[in-house]
Amino acid sequence: MVNLELSEQEIIRRQSLEELRKLGIDPYPAAKYEVNATSEEILSKFDAEKNNFQEVSIAGRIMGRRIMGNASFVELQDDKGKIQVYFKRDNICPDEDKTLYNTVFKKLLDIGDIIGVKGNVFITQVGETSVNANEFTVLSKSIKPLPVVKEKDGKTYDAFTDPEQRYRQRYVDLIVNPQVKDVFVKRTKIMNTMRDMFNERGYLEVETPILQPIPGGATARPFITHHNALDMPLYLRIADELYLKRLIVGGFDGVYEFSKDFRNEGMDRTHNPEFTVMEIYVAYKDYNWMMEFTEEMLERVALALHGKTKVKIGEHEVDFKAPYRRLTMIDAIKEHTGIDITGMKEDQLRQVCKELNIEIDETFGKGKIIDEIFGEKCEHHMIQPTFITDYPVEMSPLCKKHRNNPELTERFELMVNGKELCNAYTELNDPIDQLERFQDQLKLSEKGDDEAMFIDMDFVRALEYGMPPTSGMGMGIDRLTMFMTGQDSIQDVLFFPQMRPEKKAQKDEPAKYMEIGIPEEWVPVIQKSGFQTVNSMKNESPGSLHQKLCGTNKKHKLGLQNPSQDDVKTWIENIK
RNA sequence: GACUCAAUAGCUCAGCUGGUAGAGCACAUCCCUUUUAAGGAUGGGGUCCUGGGUUCGAGUCCCAGUUGGGUCACCA
């Protein structure tokens, strides 16, 4: 019996699957398939005069077919791209038996199937490099139809564009939208370029705990989980800073980690609950050194990706060529508001906010107010890479005080395209100062600031043993990838962005139908007729329900013996 | 979290002022023995997101919900 939940095309493909088996062809063979060329290699290196690629073996997914009697053209897509394959009946079937071409190829294969092809490369009359197939092998039958996207001269027809489906079913997105693949290839290239540079300098890639008893190193609401054996709460890390600095204490002079961090906060175009940050710590350096290191790194990444330092981000062209402009936070505020906040007290800063029409909270400390002014009035102006330096001490509890001004810290953030891209310090290594700063955070927390940092006494103890002067930097990899690939949503640089679970339509189990006397084989028919639950039939008239069921039976040629009207009447009466 | 837009065939989308659900691609059957999104003909395919309401009658109007997008807020 046919499955009523399947669409017509799915049913046909399942039938093809059976037909293949009947012909002795395994639609899901176990054996490896030897591949000796990719579409990309063939298209870029084939030379008719050299007559190379005369015994190629390629494999991929059928993305389009043009069947014309005893000759056909297939678009075959592999990891690197697409190539046309020419199927000629008498090539595939040199003998009398033409089944392989007429039945297997023409009728039983579909768009979406994965096949292997052996043949020789040639150029068609129209001038397209193609593989002339001598034999083909079914490698995997696809029983769900793929969205068909066609293109001609760079113009795309019927593109698969629904964001919800693209993110939920990324595999489909990757198959039919090849440019999506490119973003993720670039993402990996970005990380590899950084990794290469760090390794060349002898810094060590390390791994630190994701499950942490104290979520430190940043201010953010963490995810909380529970360890059964220890019977204690654990937090998913919001940063790896405190662990990496412990490693600097331990004697590594340079450590870095590409770390998945988790923050239990809102989601939008630039925030996903889990995201990737690269953090690096280098001993005997300060934040001035780190600025040079950072601009060198970004220049190198841009060059590796694009071969040039200029990158188009939205409507702007951003140049990652070092050096970048350096501007203190106070100067940035002066530049964009005309107000010099140097040396102002909290109440004066609140007055400034009032004048500038910036809303602030009662609980805000001095540092947070300054940050608010900067965020409101300056941040979005910083299109070209700009280092903003010297943040107020209150908002940087892990950062060393400025060598010339104890109100400030030796911290910088790099702003690109109006957004923060990275954050770096001359690290605080004075254990007594560190403890005091943690205690100040506690006071902020008592004042009502729910994002103030937790105190990590073990980290303080580590500093008490002595940490060399160190500079550290953290960079959002998702955001960097967005910039470097011109995507304006974080969902487009994550393979599997977080989504609400798909809702399944509520449906009663067959047993519930059988309780009121309905034979099991009629349950799918009833559900197909629109009654997903027993209760939904309650107010239906027996005559109408009877007609609908018989109709479904007939329409789908199920061949079931129809129930009598009295049967149906009894069923409805049995519903409680 | 607020506001706003959207959800119709496997995919992309029409569907007016409420009156039997439409197209292109895909699919099937046949013809054609064939070259570039596309040869021709015919045909099948629908829980119009879900649940209520108004109405003689709802894809369409109203209310509530679900999911997604956008803007804002929160948030580094």
Image (cartoon, coloured by chain):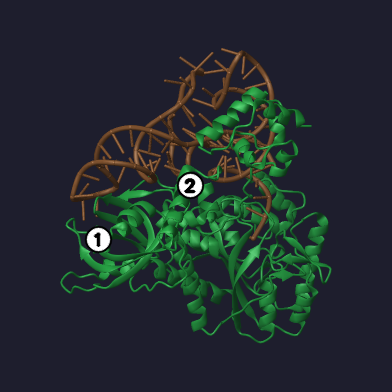
Chain colours: A green, B brown
Q: Are marks 2 and 1 in contact (CB under 8 Å)?
A: no
Which SS class for mark 1? Answer: loop
Q: Quadrant of the N terminus of chain A?
A: top right
Q: What kind of residue is marked 2? A: Ile
Q: Quadrant of residue A51?
A: bottom left
- Residue B28 spot, x, y in % from top left: 38, 44
Instruction: Tell which tag, 2 or 1, sits nearer the viewer.
Output: 1
Please state if A131 lies on the left or on the right of A554 as rendered. Answer: left
> A280 and A135: which one is in front?
A135
Residue at the image position 59 percent from the left and 35 percent from the top: A561
Mark 2–mark 1 distance (CA, rounded to whole Å): 31 Å
Q: Quadrant of residue A40?
A: bottom left
Please state if A561 lies on the left or on the right of A459 as rendered. Answer: left
Report whether mark 2 lies on the same chain as mark 1: yes
Residue to which mark 1 is pinned: A96
Mark seen at residue A11: 2
- Residue A36 spot, x, y in % from top left: 34, 74
Height in image: A379 above or below A405? above
Count every numbered label the image shows and give the total: 2
Q: What kind of residue is marked 1? A: Glu
Please state if A227 lies on the left or on the right of A195 as rendered. Answer: right
- Residue B9 spot, x, y in % from top left: 48, 39
Can residue A214 be seen in the rendering of this structure? Answer: yes
Can residue A313 be seen in the rendering of this structure? Answer: no
Marked residue chain, label 2: A
Q: Quadrant of the C terminus of chain A?
A: top right
> A383 and A331: which one is in front?
A383
